[in-house]
Amino acid sequence: MEEVYKEAYSEISEIIKLMPRTMVSKIPIELIDAIESEKSNTYVPNITLPIEDCNIKEETKAILYLIYRDFINDEDNKRKLQIRDAKKIEKVEEIMKKNNILNNIL
């Protein structure tokens, strides 16, 4: 695994420690265990409250968004975000096909 993701997992691990128990209880223990086992052994994140004031990695933000969307959010909002994200992905794929970007990669 790339080091940037191990560092992101380290940041997420620290953020989870700051979350209210009611939120943490919605995250599958298997996911928390995976984050703990894959996090960096050398990177020490500086995470404090409010988290918005911390300089966290873009990868951390993306993973946190997915955790929020799929586990912490209520079912109505979860479904809305999943639909919105699917539309965005579809739009990006269309642009990539139009510009032959996928063909150049494969």
Image (spheres, rainbow, N blue to C red):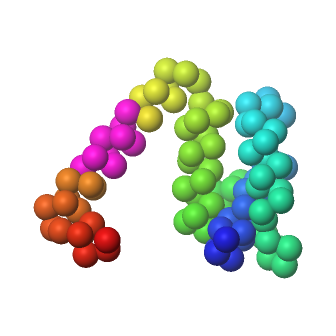
Question: Quadrant of the rendered structure where residue 47 is?
Answer: bottom right
**Magenta stretch containing residue 87, yes or no?**
yes
Q: Which residues are magenta?
A: 83-91
> How many numbered marks are there?
0
**Magenta stretch containing residue 77, yes or no?**
no
* Residue 104 percent coordinates (x, y): 25, 75
- Left or right of 12, for residue 93: left
Question: Quadrant of the rendered structure where residue 21 is?
Answer: top right
Q: Residue furthest left?
A: 98
- In the image, is residue 14 above or below residue 28? below
Q: Nearer the viewer, residue 102 or 96?
A: 102
Question: Quadrant of the rendered structure where residue 59 is?
Answer: bottom right
- Residue at 81% of width from left, 39% of height from top? 29
- Residue at 30% of width from left, 41% of height from top? 87
- In the image, is residue 102 above or below residue 12? below
Dominant SS type (magenta)? helix
* Residue 71 percent coordinates (x, y): 64, 34
- In the image, is residue 83 above or below residue 56? above
> Quarter of the image containing the C terminus?
bottom left
- Left or right of 9, for residue 65: left
* Residue 72 percent coordinates (x, y): 65, 33
Q: Residue furthest top?
A: 76
- Left or right of 9, for residue 85: left
> Quarter of the image containing the N terminus?
bottom right
- Residue at 84% of width from left, 78% of height from top? 42
- Left or right of 68, for residue 81: left
**Residue 6 in view here:** yes
**Residue 49 in view here:** no
* Residue 27 percent coordinates (x, y): 73, 37
- In the image, is residue 93 above or below residue 74? below
